[in-house]
Each structure stands twice: as structure tokens, then as C-alpha cells.
Image (spheres, rainbow, N blue to C red):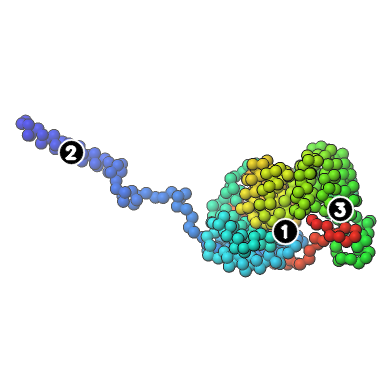
Amino acid sequence: MSKPELQSETSRRNALKLLGLGSTAGVFGLFDTSKARAETYETPAYAKGAAPVTIKSVRAITTAPGGSNLVIVKVETSEPGLYGVGCATFTQRALVVVPAINTYLNEFCVGKDVDNIEDMWQSAYVSSYWRNGPVLNNALSGLDQALWDIKGKRANMPVYQLLGGKSRIAVDTYTHASGPTPEAIADKVQQFMEMGFRHVRIQQGGYGGVGAMQELKPDFKTAGYGRETDDFSDQRTYLKRVPKMFDVVRKRCGEDIQLLHDMHELTEPIDAINMIKGLEEYRPYFIEDPFSPENMNWFKQLRQTTAVPIAMGELFNNINEFKEPMANHLFDFIRIHISQIGGITPAMKVARLGEWFNVRTAWHGPGDTSPVGHAANNSIDIAVWNFGIQESQMFSDKVKEVFPGCPTIKNGYYQVSESPGLGIDINEKEAAKYPIGTKSRWTVRKNDGTILKP
């Protein structure tokens, strides 16, 4: 074969090889065009994202199946059947919170994206210009919790998963033992121990001994001063009774049970310091609220006097009130009322800050926190590392009918719902059977009629 013929044959063979390679490449997509790839590639479900959902309405639902005035925020969305609920309960002034929700928050929120919780919180917080306060904070808290409820439902996850997932098996709680005598209180503590509780708060009567001093007739009532319904606390009697109560309960119930007590700020600061020092031998889990928010500077002297653990903060309105006390180790437990502070969003910020200073959480969970609020508490409790303890409530059948999905307690632990969102709902038809009122009983006086600050 001549040289020109050989070159021609080589070119022909190379061309055939390239054609063969091209066919194979076509099969495996090596030389596929971007247009062809776009036509055959399907975006994974995780990468598609959820369609935008906006707020359709924000409204308040009021009810009192357990006796306390409760306010619930319901946020309805542009997606049919998708809504969220949150606790906005300011039980002493419940009727004032309702228009803040129905008028101002509704107008402020309609049409906004339900997913932008942080932006919604910050903008609503400053939109009134003057910040916080219990009325606006409770309204904002209800909105915030409802938005987290919606986000959990959209993600098909319980809210605690969105906060980082479980840090423990369940939420350890304390319950309440009160009675007219230390012996009666010890009986109740033993009953709770048999039910599996490891922590019990003990109170002789109500806060400051209110209701357990019937034998003392205060002078202000004899003089007809104040209202007939005003409560009375004799500080000296209360200060003598608390150590005796601890002594009786500790001797009867042993060392394994953790004992707590709430002073509720109803004594003079120096008297509170002396009493707490006297309780050291009984090893309290914590003493709650020794001073009112007006007396925060006394904490330095308390810390220098005793090492008894202290819980504080349920009366704080602003998350910034926690910063300096936590940084200076003035108390050991963050005592936040979630609806007072503005919801899950700000409470998580305080909880995370507490981790840096080894301050633990102990969210406020009284009867005037709705079951929705308790579900929000538990969502944070099970997720944050620096959880301490959770105040518990045992809900009546009436309350459970109004709030399907009420948190349940087993062996002293709150069981956290695995349902999407907060895992709780409100039956509006049942809720309407229990209208709220305007009565408020937070008036406690000394013997001479002077108001005591809680």
C-alpha cells in the first residue's frame, strides 16, 4: 500500500474509533449537553424546599377550664388547615392582652412569611417603640410559639428537633406539696416520692405563709383597711416556720428527695439572707425568688453569705435583665416565664447564654401557664444542655378536653410529644364553655396594711 493510501486508511480507522467512542459516551452521558442533563435531572426532595406560606390571621382564644385565665394565640395561614398555637397568658390582666393580639398583632402580621420567626420577633418587639412589658410581651410570646408550632408542622418534626434534638430521655420535674403544718407537708412529699418524683417544692400555706395564718387577725382587717379579699402575711411568723418545715420534712423523708422552696420576694432582703443561710443544713435544691426585681443588688451579699442554690427571674420582662446576674454568677437557675419574656425565641437565647456561665434552666410552670406554654417549656427543656428542672402541673380532665395533647407525667418526668410542632391543640368549642374573668388576687399586706411586693 502506498504512503498516501496508508495515511487515508489510518484516518478512516481513527474516524471509526471516534464514532464508536462517541456512541458509548452518549450512552454514559460523557458528552451530554447541559440542556439534556437539565431535562433528565430531577431535583431531590430535600433541595426543593417548601412553598412559601403567609399569615392569614392572628387571633386570641380565651378560656379558664382550670380556674386561671388563659390566653391562646392562634395563627392561621394561607395553606388550608395549617395553623399554630401559642401561650399568651397574663392571667392577672388577661383581657388587656386580647386586643393587643386581635388588633395590633393581627394587622402587623397578615401577609408575612411564617418562616421568618427571628425577623417577625424583632420587628414586632420594636414596632411599639417602647419595648416589652407584660401585655405586649405575652402577646408576642403567643405569636412566637405559634410560629414555631407551624414551622415544626411544616418540617413534619416536633419543635425540639428544630432546636437541636434530644439532650436527655425526658424532662425531669418538681411538683408542689403544701399544707397547714410541716407534718401534713411531709405526708404529701412521701406520696409524691411513691409516685416517682425526685424533686418536691414545699410550702406551708401559700407564698409567704398566706392562708396558713388564720389564727392571726391582722390589724388592717380589724380597721377595715383595704379589701376583704386582700391576703395577709406576717413576715416574722413565716421566717420562723420555714426552717422548721424543712427540718420535719428532711427527717421524715430522708436525704434522697430534693427539696425546693419559693419565697416569692415577700420578706425584707436582709431577713431573706439570714433565713436562707439557716437552711444550709437541709441542702435545698434551690430557694426561689428571695428578692424582688427592685432589690437585685442584694444578691452580692447573699452570695457572700451562703452557698444555697438560688433560682430567679420569673418577674423579669426583658432578656437583658439576665445578662449581668448570670455573668456574675448571682444565681444558679434561670427562672423564666416563657410568655412573660416573649416566647421560645428569646428564651433559647437566655438558655444558650446560661451554658457559658453554668447557669441551668428552671422555667416557670404554674397553673396560669397554659398546657400550650408547658409544651413550649418542654420543647426547650429536652434540647438544651444546661437544663436543670421543670415546674410541673397535673392537668384535670376539663383542661385535657380543652387542650388535646396535654403534656403527661410518668415517674416524675414530663413526656415530650413526638407529634409535629408543639404537639398540642385547642378545642375552641370546649374552650368557650369556660369564660375568663377579671378578678385578681395578687394583693398581700403586712399586719399594718402595707403592701408586700411579690
**What residue type is disc 3 on?**
Gly
Q: Which mark is residue 16?
A: 2
Alpha carbon separation for disc pair 3 and 2? 101 Å
Of 152 and 325, the residue lying toward us:
325
Q: Earlier in the sequence, mark 3 or mark 1?
A: 3
Residue 19 located left or right of residue 379: left
Where residue 129 sits in the image (x, y, percent)? 62, 63
Task: Estimate how packed mark 2 is, as few (under 14), some (14 to 19) or many (20 or more) residues with alpha carbons within 10 Å.
Answer: few
Q: Are marks 3 and 1 in contact (CB under 8 Å)?
A: no
**What residue type is disc 2 on?**
Leu
The residue sitting at 74% across, 58% down in the picture is 368
Q: In this rendering, which labeled residue sits more in front, label 3 or label 1?
A: 3
Element carrying mark 2: helix
Q: Earlier in the sequence, mark 3 or mark 2?
A: 2
Element carrying mark 3: helix
Task: Estimate how packed mark 3 is, as few (under 14), some (14 to 19) or many (20 or more) residues with alpha carbons within 10 Å.
Answer: many
The C terminus is located in which quarter?
bottom right
Q: Is residue 313 above or below residue 439?
A: above
Does the rendering let one see residue 231?
no
The residue sitting at 63% across, 45% down in the picture is 352
Alpha carbon separation for disc pair 1 and 2? 82 Å
The residue sitting at 34% across, 52% down in the picture is 39
Of 101 and 62, the residue lying toward us:
101
Q: Which residue is mark 3?
A: 209
Of 441 and 379, the residue lying toward us:
441
Count of numbered labels shown in the rendering: 3
Alpha carbon separation for disc pair 3 and 1? 28 Å
Where residue 61 sits in the image (x, y, percent)? 66, 65
Q: Earlier in the sequence, mark 1 or mark 2?
A: 2
Q: Which mark is residue 399?
A: 1
**What residue type is disc 1 on?**
Val
Does the rendering let one see residue 131?
yes
